[in-house]
């Protein structure tokens, strides 16, 4: 990561910088430098008689930020940006800690200094405590502490809205920051920023997750962007390559404008495929379904032309709150989705809590959360929580076509206990005279290697299967999917992964058991033909990928793909595999 090309004091030379692309696409615009805590902080002494007044000024700023976070929390909850809610909650909790409410007041009193300086001193002290921490989760909190301090500092400066209400120029603006919080990124919604670049952050940082869900081109980990780029300079973000070009010359700019127009045209052209059936050149029909997190996501699903929901990650309804949603609340949420899909199938996955998704922020007390009390393991240890959810899903089934999907199944006992829990919920509803669809299919996620290897028992007992490639890869290759230090080892094309996935699809097909893939691999157009070649006819993905994958399906000949896929499965040499993949996708 770094910059190429020199820059004199006042020159406008062209130079490029390389970082980690976290959200694809091309953005062209003028730089707006985002001043945060990195900006200079005034330091001045105050007379003893002003100490109380300065402390009150500090208290007011904290109060203002508390209100700002409360409003932000309200606005993101149950919105399409609900994934932001836990981050806002963490910021609120940090703000209410003595480290922010009390310590700076003490510093004002002891050092008789202005509130900004007191906060700066306190922040330095807090950040110093992070230097020796190795736990990546706790290290991430460093960014949160910094961001909370930035908010208070902005409130002290009297500028709540640190991002200008309107960009200074007519054309697109690109935000250049040392670091952005997810809460800052959400402000993009009401401001026509074209993209953002930051010095800090990783591919799995909160900000990256939010940027991806909002489809804004973005690059992080540029290290020196904030210090090298000047206000208003022209910038190109190539979010596909992870490259930033500052002051591009005319030919480079023309090239990128062309690329930008081409991708816009491509997107518009793709929209025409919305209602076309996804059929291969050989006439095989393929189902392209969508993954959602909240009821509000149904709208983009409908717009994508997806013919069903293959994965509703229901745990998002349980996050960012102290209480659990009761049966009625859950029923209403599931019903909203089912009715919104107007008769198309909706696969509701039961609570997949644990690992990186927590109910109350306590998950990191577990040493190895990804291997801990997660998903079905958690549900079986909390039978009342599981029962409430199953009842709510079953009740929603009478409003459309519902399927129940159980995550992380690993053993015979789990499978039996889970099915027993569904039977109990059914029996209760029957006894109470509550209507539901008696034929709701029960499926299981195949995302633990043990389940992929011991597949026959899952095939015998379940109505359908869905391969969760995100976890299947994590558990097969022993790579924590949230740890960016090992992210480069995350390899969907590892021969062990391909062998497991193709084996699951083949065996399921042989038994006439419906099988889907709902992990990220299903939405990766470079892997569409490979999965089709494995025999997959059912994909579930983020709605934004549906049309691109459909286009690939429409241009695929299964007969031509078959021999190449067979060779891919036989090779274990990465270079040969790469060449075969190129051939397959040609
Ligand atoms: C998966 O593991 O592939 C999956 C779809 O589930 P999640 O990403 O929610 O763990
Ligand atoms: Mg999973």
Image: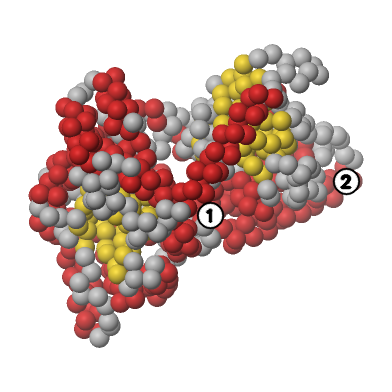
How far across and down, in percent of the image, does residue 561 sit?
23, 36
Question: Can you identify the residue that label 1 sits on?
Answer: 81
Q: Residue furthest bottom?
A: 433
Q: Would residue 565 appear left or right of 221 to someone viewing this image?
A: left
Query: Residue at 33% of width from left, 42% of height from top?
Result: 555
Q: Nearer the viewer, mark 1 or mark 2?
A: 1
Q: Say few, some or many: other residues with alpha carbon within 10 Å of mark 2 (under 14 / 14 to 19 / 20 or more).
A: some
Residue 419 in view: yes
Nearer to us in this view, 284 or 93: 284
Residue 385 in view: no
What is the secondary structure assignment of the residue under circle 1?
loop
* Quadrant of the snapshot with the C terminus: top left
How far across and down, in percent of the image, does residue 16 sit?
62, 21
Nearer to us in this view, 200 or 156: 200
Residue 99, quarter of picture = top right
Nearer to us in this view, 387 or 581: 581
């Amino acid at each position: 990561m770094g910059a190429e090309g020199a820059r004199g004091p006042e020159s406008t030379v062209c130079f490029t910088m390389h970082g980690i692309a976290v959200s694809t696409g091309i953005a062209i615009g003028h730089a707006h430098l985002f001043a945060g805590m990195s900006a200079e902080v005034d330091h001045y002494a105050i007379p003893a008689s002003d100490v109380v007044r300065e402390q009150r000024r500090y208290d007011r700023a904290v109060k203002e930020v508390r209100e700002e976070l409360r409003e932000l929390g309200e606005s993101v909850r149950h919105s399409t940006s609900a994934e932001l809610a836990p981050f806002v909650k963490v910021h609120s909790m940090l703000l209410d800690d003595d480290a922010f409410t009390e310590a700076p007041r003490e510093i004002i009193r002891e050092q008789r200094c202005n509130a900004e300086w007191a906060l700066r001193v306190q922040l330095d002290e807090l950040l110093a405590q992070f230097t020796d921490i190795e736990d990546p989760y706790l290290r991430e909190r460093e960014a949160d502490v910094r961001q909370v301090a930035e908010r208070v500092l902005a409130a002290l400066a009297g500028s709540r809205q640190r991002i200008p209400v309107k960009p200074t120029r007519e054309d697109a603006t690109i935000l250049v920051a040392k670091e952005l919080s997810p809460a800052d990124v959400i402000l993009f919604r009401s401001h026509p920023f074209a993209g953002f670049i930051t010095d800090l952050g990783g591919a799995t940082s909160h900000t990256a997750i939010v940027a991806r869900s909002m489809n804004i081109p973005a690059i992080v980990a540029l290290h020196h962007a904030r210090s090298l780029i000047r206000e208003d300079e022209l910038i190109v973000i190539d979010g596909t390559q992870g490259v930033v070009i500052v002051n591009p010359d005319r030919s480079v700019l023309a090239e990128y404008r062309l690329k930008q127009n081409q991708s816009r045209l491509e997107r518009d052209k793709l929209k025409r495929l919305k209602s076309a059936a996804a059929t291969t050149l050989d006439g095989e029909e393929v189902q392209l379904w969508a993954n959602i997190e909240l009821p509000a996501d149904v709208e983009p699903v409908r717009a994508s032309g997806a013919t069903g929901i293959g994965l509703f990650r229901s745990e998002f309804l349980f996050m960012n709150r102290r209480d659990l949603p009761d049966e009625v609340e859950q029923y209403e949420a599931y019903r909203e989705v089912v009715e919104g899909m107007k008769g198309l199938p909706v696969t509701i996955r039961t609570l997949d809590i644990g690992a990186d998704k927590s109910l109350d922020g306590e998950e990191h007390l577990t040493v190895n959360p990804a291997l801990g009390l997660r998903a079905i393991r958690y549900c079986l240890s909390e039978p009342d929580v599981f029962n409430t959810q199953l009842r709510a899903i079953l009740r929603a089934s009478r409003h459309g076509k519902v399927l129940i999907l159980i995550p992380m199944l690993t053993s015979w006992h789990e499978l039996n206990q889970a099915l027993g829990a569904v039977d109990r919920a059914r029996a209760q509803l029957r006894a109470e005279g509550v209507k539901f669809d008696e034929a709701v299919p029960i499926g299981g996620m195949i995302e633990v290697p043990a389940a992929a290897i011991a597949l026959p028992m899952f095939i015998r007992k379940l109505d359908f299967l869905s391969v969760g490639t995100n976890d299947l890869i994590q558990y097969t290759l022993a790579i924590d999917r949230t740890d960016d230090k090992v992210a480069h080892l995350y390899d969907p094309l590892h021969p062990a992964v391909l062998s497991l996935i193709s084996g699951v699809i083949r065996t399921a097909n042989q038994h006439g058991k419906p099988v889907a893939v709902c992990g990220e691999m299903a939405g990766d157009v470079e892997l569409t033909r490979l999965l089709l070649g494995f025999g997959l006819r059912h994909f579930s993905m983020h709605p934004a990928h549906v049309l691109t994958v459909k286009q690939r399906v429409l241009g695929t000949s299964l007969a031509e793909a078959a021999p190449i896929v067979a060779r891919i499965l036989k090779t274990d040499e990465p270079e040969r595999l790469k060449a075969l993949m190129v051939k397959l996708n040609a």
